[in-house]
Image (tube, rainbow, N blue to C red):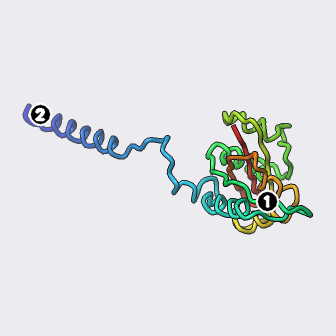
Amino acid sequence: MNFQKIKLYSFFLLFSCVLFSCQEDETDPSQDDNTSLETTFNVNGQELVNLVNKYRTEGCRCGGEQMPAIGTITWNETLAKTAYLHSKDMNDQNYFSHTGKDGSDPGIRMERQSYDWRTYGENIAKGYTNEQAVVEGWIDSEGHCRNIMNPNFEEMGVGREGEYWTQVFGTR
């Protein structure tokens, strides 16, 4: 009988320790965690936001047109997930297009992730090795540059899988 009491006491002690340690480690998932920007969806989100905002706040040339300085853009995890899933699909199915193999366009892919968009844009790229190179590649392409410099876009996300990069812009 004494052994069973010790065994029961040990079980409750262990259970209490596990229960309380789990509660201490919980965080509010709605809180913004800037460290997550560094490794989300195989990209350094903070570096991408910084690079894009440098162009947006200084202005740049898109093709033959000088684009004026505009406001900054913010990172959005839902758009990053949307971008990543498109990059993954292109990588897995070996294609390169704004149209998914299932016929989806960026707006449909955003809606699948519950992003209620008012306006959107998408840049894709293949073969770049890092964030700076891909942003410079997009800036060197007139249409991609215009997306980066579009003052109607308030949020962005980027995802990479293999050699494929997708940048999604949106405004709710």
Amino acid type, mark 2: Lys
Badge 2 or badge 1: first in the primary sequence: 2
Helix, strand or loop for disc 1: loop
CA gap between label 2 and label 1 equals 76 Å
Nearer to us of marks 2 and 1 is: 1
> Residue 68, which numbered label?
1
From the viewer's perspective, tell me whether residue 140 is left or right of residue 8.
right
State the residue lying farthest toward the right: 64
Amino acid type, mark 1: Pro
The quadrant in which the C terminus is found is top right
Q: Residue at x 77, y 42 (%)?
A: 120
Rendering coords of residue 82 (x, y %)? 70, 44
Which residue in the protein does label 2 denote?
5
The quadrant in which the N terminus is found is top left
Neighbor class of circle 1 (other Cα within 10 Å; few <14, some 14-19, many 20+) is: some
**Quadrant of the image occupied by residue 136:** bottom right
Helix, strand or loop for disc 2: helix
Rendering coords of residue 21 (x, y %)? 30, 45
**Quadrant of the image occupied by residue 9:** top left
Rendering coords of residue 27 (x, y %)? 41, 44
Image marks 2 and 1: residues in contact by CB distance under 8 Å? no
Count the numbered circles shown: 2
Q: Residue at x 50, y 51 (%)?
A: 33
Most foreground residue, 71 or 55: 71
Residue 27 drawn above or below residue 64:
above
**Quadrant of the image occupied by residue 42:** bottom right
Neighbor class of circle 2 (other Cα within 10 Å; few <14, some 14-19, many 20+) is: few
State the residue lying farthest toward the front: 68
Q: Residue at x 90, y 63 (%)?
A: 63
